[in-house]
Image: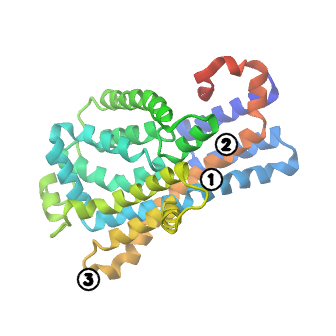
Amino acid sequence: MSTVLLTIGAGILLLVILISVLKFNAFLSMLLVSLLIALIALPAAEVVPALTTGFGNTMKSIGIIIILGSIIGILLEKTGATLSIAAAIVRMTGMKRAGLAAGMTGFITGIPIFCDSGFIVLSGVNRSLALRSGKPMVYMATLLAAGLYSVHCLIPPHPGAMAAAGIMKNSVGTQILAGLLVALPATFAGFAWARLMCRKEFRQPQPAGGSADAVLSTASAVVPPVWKSLLPVLVPLMLISIRSILLLYASSSPSILERILLMIGYPETALLVGIGLAMLLLPGTEIKKVNLFIEEAIQKAGPVLILTAAGGALGNVIRAAGIGDEAGKYLPLAQWGLLVPFL
């Protein structure tokens, strides 16, 4: 086996030991492992550029999205909108099926947007739903993540799925069918995993002041109606979906309306629209607090951004080291088909 493959394998093993065994800081662990792999596998002049390029490209692609999604989530939480949505979901599904509701919400929401921003936007709703239903938060979070991450980049109109359809010259219908064949079993596997790992009774932590029902009834004196609470989430999803469809069928000379929809359909601008709708939920006396809410959202998004970008740095170093070329020497990739993504 080549030095490159051995170096990358040893680096990944070291990363697991640092984070899981030694409980060392995850950000510094990824940065150190990336640096060690780069020092061994790359010329000295390419070491730091490989790190900074991977870190910067990742931050550039998802940084604004994660921050804006976090702001929407905080505003929904502070205005009581998450409580309103959670109560509506429980009324529709019943307490016993709250986990299914979380999973299916993630599955549907994850189709048009990136899973990381979707998870942040829906995390407040999921916390309220867990509190209302009495389910363990780890169980509810696993089900939400199973739905979101199973459809990530698999089913149109997700931007990644649309790009894959274009590269592979597939029709959208074929891409949807192929994506569902992968995403549905993955989602059910996530459901089974959550049930398996959460079989024990968890004591749901309660905020000071009483039971879950008491917390829900006193958390916000006046919560917004469900339809208004859903707008900050649904409108961005709709705008992103419309843009994906327009990109597929847009003419060479789009109309003014099409140009406007293409512009506001970017995830960044669509989430800005969602923030505007979420701010409309604030009572007049609460507008002064919006800066505090935004600061809180940025603080919560910070660790997600840093860890994701550090992972991007590690991934770029591995790519620069030539993992694809090295693996191709040992594996007839063309004959492995669907197994290639798991290598």
Disc nearer the start of the sequence (1/2)? 1
Which element is circle 2 on? helix
Q: Quadrant of the N terminus?
A: top right
Whether residue 7 can be seen here: no
Q: Is residue 207 left or right of residue 114?
A: left
Which element is circle 3 on? helix
Residue closer to the observer: 151 or 64: 151
The spot of residue 215 in percent (x, y) is 16, 59
Disc nearer the start of the sequence (1/3)? 1
The alpha-carbon separation of the residues under discs 2 and 3 comes to 47 Å
Q: Is residue 221 left or right of residue 333?
A: left
Q: Residue 3 occupies which quadrant of the picture?
A: top right
Which element is circle 1 on? helix
Q: Residues within 10 Å of mark 1 (few under 14, many from 20)?
A: many
Question: What residue does disc 2 label?
Answer: 315
The alpha-carbon separation of the residues under discs 1 and 3 comes to 38 Å
Pointers 1 and 2 in contact (C-beta within 8 Å): yes
Whether residue 38 can be seen here: yes
Q: Quadrant of the C terminus?
A: top right
Residue closer to the observer: 1 or 72: 72
Question: What residue does disc 3 label?
Answer: 285
